[in-house]
Image (cartoon, grey):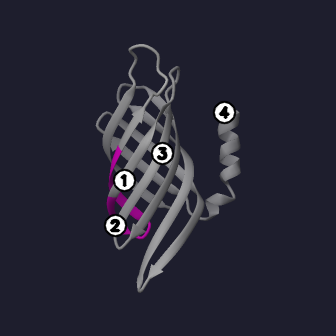
Amino acid sequence: MRRVLLALTLASLPLAAQSTLVSVIRQPRATAAEFTVPVTEFQVRDGGDFADLHLGVGLGARHWDDGDNALRFVADANATADQVFLGVGAIVEVPPGEGAFIGPRLRVGWAFHPRWALSLEGEHLERPFAPGLTVRRRSSLGLALTTRF
């Protein structure tokens, strides 16, 4: 697993020169941190207004308040226009010793600076192939602080 993480990190270095997004998320029973590097990034101009679009992939980690951790793989699309931040993403979360949780995420918030945004995040993760009576869903709301480097 360490070799895979190292390979993903080294493969993303040339892309990191564009603008990496880093997010810190606080949920009711957990804290998460993620970084995404752009697959593509562009700026759209409508009159005098600009909209920044970021399509990216990345890694993250979630730390539960009871001490458990989980690795997260992220694919997301974020847009910032006229102090509004909107993000849509797909999450794969892999807790140690369990099957993967997969699901969508939505962020809506306020871009109070061209490189900073504060947003409300909602995600719904499910484990589609879980056997028996194990936990199959994780849904949560949280507050996310996102910055662009």
Give me the disc on residue 90: 3
Q: Residue 107 bears which disc, if any?
A: 1
Residue 17 falls in which quadrant of the image?
Answer: bottom right
**Is residue 18 or residue 89 the one in the foreground?**
89
Disc 3/disc 4 C-alpha distance (Å):
23 Å
| Residue appearing at x 40%, y 17% in the figure | 134
Which tag is nearer the camera, tag 3 or tag 1?
A: 3
Q: Quadrant of residue 31?
A: top left
Tell me which segment is drawn in magenta.
109-122
Distance from label 3 to label 2 (Cα)?
Answer: 21 Å
Is 25 left, or right, of 3 in this rendering? left
Does dot 2 land on a helix, a strand or a loop?
Answer: strand
> Which residue, given by chain and number where applicable, does mark 2 sit on?
84
User: In the image, which is nearer the foreground, mark 3 or mark 4?
Assistant: 3
User: Which comes sooner in the sequence, label 3 or label 4?
Assistant: 4
- Mark 4: secondary structure: helix
Label 4 to label 2: alpha-carbon separation: 37 Å
Numbered disc total: 4
Which numbered mark, 1 or 4, is in the foreground of this view? Answer: 1
Question: Tags 3 and 4 in contact by the CB under 8 Å rule?
Answer: no
Q: Amino acid at mark 4?
A: Arg
- Going from N to C along the chain, the mark reached first, 4 or 2, is 4
The mark found on residue 60 in the picture is none
Q: Which mark is on residue 2?
A: 4
Q: Inspect the image, locate mark 2, and give the three-letter code of the amino acid beneath it.
A: Val
Q: Secondary structure at mark 3?
A: strand
From the top left corner, tell me how far across and down residue 109 is, in percent.
32, 59
